[in-house]
Amino acid sequence: MIQKEIISKEQKKAARYAKAMGHPIRMYVLELLSKQSCCYSGDLSEILPIVKSTLSQHLKELQDAGLIQGEIEAPRIKYCLNKENWNEAQILLGNILNFHIKQSSCEDVK
Amino acid sequence: MIQKEIISKEQKKAARYAKAMGHPIRMYVLELLSKQSCCYSGDLSEILPIVKSTLSQHLKELQDAGLIQGEIEAPRIKYCLNKENWNEAQILLGNILNFHIKQSSCEDVK
DNA sequence: ACCTTTGTTCGTAATTTCACGAACTACGAA
DNA sequence: TTCGTAGTTCGTGAAATTACGAACAAAGGT
């Protein structure tokens, strides 16, 4: 017997994304990545007022939420937004925040 | 001596709002209020799978974050979005999520 | 005054988050 | 192979989150 869920899958996903965004350090990283396409953990570690192990935890949290992805590049790791999930977060959170993405002209992804 | 802040006020605010949105129950309430202008705690309590004291805590969290406001109305309490802060959340989170409130241009995308 | 309704606060407990330093892994360079 | 760099994992502790039920407070109706 399937009981009707009060809280939708979309709302749970949106909450998951919002939760990942719910810390100043992680918000900083996300905003950076939304503007410059990629960054390296080491660069962040130099700038941000936390030790690298803590930064690693935050980056892991963002990865677990699906918002970013790391790519091994020689000695370092290059982080970028996870395009697909970032797009989903834009849509889901945009929906709650009453933004309306114009599908037509901006983005042709699907 | 003023040290330059790495993480901006706006990012901290945005993270605060995102944090408040980072739970399915609270996301549900916010989405409801973004669509129907107001609601009552009792109605939520009947629908949602949590006891009223827990719901009260979530509503308090949303109030503390500034996203909603309660108004005493006879025996009940009427909750609405806090328009001013909700608008700020729209702008701040919209900025990070690269939404464009103005219809105008999309040429900078990609 | 008493009862009912509505919602908050309190006390408690389990879990998660956040932060640090130490230790560890992976890997390219010397 | 040894060393240095880049980053993760482990162990720890403090604090916050989430949830519940019991007790409490406010206010309208009887």
Image (spheres, coloured by chain):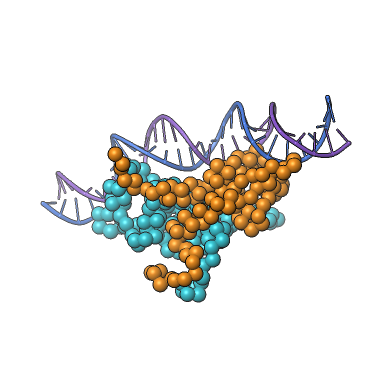
Chain colours: A cyan, B orange, C blue, D purple
Task: Identify the residue at horizontal 39%, vertical 60% (top origin).
Answer: A34
In the image, B23 versus A74, the foreground residue is B23
* Image spot of residue A92 (x, y percent): 54, 60
Residue A53 vertical placement versus D25 (above, below):
below
In this rendering, position of residue B83 left or right of residue B77: left
Residue A78: quadrant of the picture: bottom left
How many numbered circles does the render carry? 0
Residue B57 vertical placement versus B31 (above, below):
above
In the image, A75 versus A95, the foreground residue is A95
* Image spot of residue A25 (x, y percent): 39, 47
Is residue A23 at least partly visible in the picture? yes
In this rendering, position of residue B95 left or right of residue A7: left
Task: Identify the residue at horizontal 38%, vertical 53% (top origin).
Answer: A29
Task: Identify the residue at horizontal 50%, vertical 49% (top origin).
Answer: B17
Is residue A71 at least partly visible in the picture? no
* Image spot of residue B65 (x, y percent): 53, 45
In the image, B93 versus A53, the foreground residue is B93
